[in-house]
Image (tube, rainbow, N blue to C red):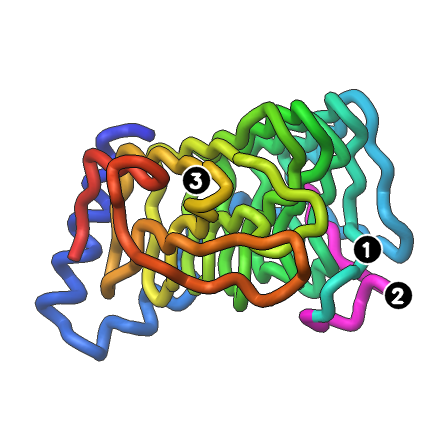
Amino acid sequence: MTNSRRNRGRVIGAAVVALGLGAAVVFTNFASAAVPEATGEQVVTESIEVSGVFDGANKRFIGGGALGDGGQDEGQDALFELADGATLQNVILGSPAADGVHCSGSCTISNVHWEDVGEDAATFRGTNATVLIEGGSAASGTDKVFQDNRGAGGSVTIRDFEVSDFGKLYRSCGNCSTQAARTVTISNIIATAPGGTLAGVNTNLGDKVTLDGITIVGDDISLCDRFEGNDTGDEPTKIGEGPDGTSCVASNVTGP
């Protein structure tokens, strides 16, 4: 992330302090400021299957038919289904976006913008899967932005990304039937309130999140929430919050 983008976060954060609640509207969809102008629009009624590289040339894709109810139900289909090794780039996901993007294994998601996150923005699966999210933004994620359901091995990297109005930027699955230790690196992020936490990890399962170069704009946002995960399907128990030096490590954080 360039110094100008970092400085933008600091300047806007200072403006909130100066202007008080009257400035809150500015941050409601801050991440949307990064969205390029759409070059066209396509309604998606069945998941688009991607192998190789799919370059959307900044076209907006929105859900229709069975993908268009805009609900938060678990188990929805995605607008894009990425095969192992696939790349999705230069895409805008409008509203409704169903369950966003599914990666069945390793994948790259580059300069993809979610204007209004549906159930999740993207979900990751597979063993030994390496996931890279670089560039892009997400706004209005009621629950999770990135859901990590991967098995053992691999890693997730999220970098040069902007997020606003969200519950969790990243969540390692807390109650999947097959669990594993998951590793994620989150770097060069602008996170704009309202927001819950940047990462939810399961300390008892050996998860580790490394955060570096985080700019928080507006109100407080937790860097990480620590959970006791399980494989029974029960709601995981939150056991702590904030860096602990083991399961959650953070550096170069600026903001409230």
- Residue 29 image position (x, y, % from top left): 43, 62
Q: Nearer the viewer, residue 23 or 207?
A: 207
For the N terminus, the quadrant is top left
Q: Amino acid at mark 1?
A: Asp
**How many residues crowd around disc 1 within 10 Å: few (fewer than 14), some, or many (20 or more)?**
some
Residue 60 is covered by the magenta coloring:
yes
Q: What residue is shown at x 33% (from left), y 73% (from top)?
A: 25
Residue at the bottom extreme?
22
Q: Look at the image and give the residue range highlighted in magenta.
A: 59-72
- Give the mark toward the camera: 1 or 2: 1
Q: Nearer the viewer, residue 171 or 214?
A: 171
Identify the mark at residue 121; answer none if there is no mark: none
Per the image, the residue denoted by label 2 is 66
Residue 95 is covered by the magenta coloring:
no
Q: What residue is shown at x 79% (from left), y 60% (from top)?
A: 76
Of label 1 and label 2, which has the lower sequence position?
Answer: 2
- Residue 206 image position (x, y, % from top left): 46, 37
**How many residues crowd around disc 2 within 10 Å: few (fewer than 14), some, or many (20 or more)?**
few
Q: What residue is shown at x 50% (from left), y 42% (from top)?
A: 205
* Label 1 secondary element: loop
Q: Amino acid at mark 3?
A: Phe
Of label 3 and label 1, which has the lower sequence position?
Answer: 1
Q: Is residue 105 above or below residue 102?
A: above
Residue at the left extreme?
18
In whole angstroms, how far apart are the C-alphas of marks 3 and 1?
A: 24 Å
User: Does 154 sit left or right of 127 as displayed?
Assistant: left
Is any part of residue 37 visible from this angle? no
Per the image, the residue denoted by label 3 is 161
- Dot 1 and dot 2 residues touching (CB under 8 Å): yes
In whole angstroms, how far apart are the C-alphas of marks 1 and 2?
A: 9 Å
Q: Nearer the viewer, residue 131 or 232?
A: 232
Is any part of residue 237 visible from this angle? yes
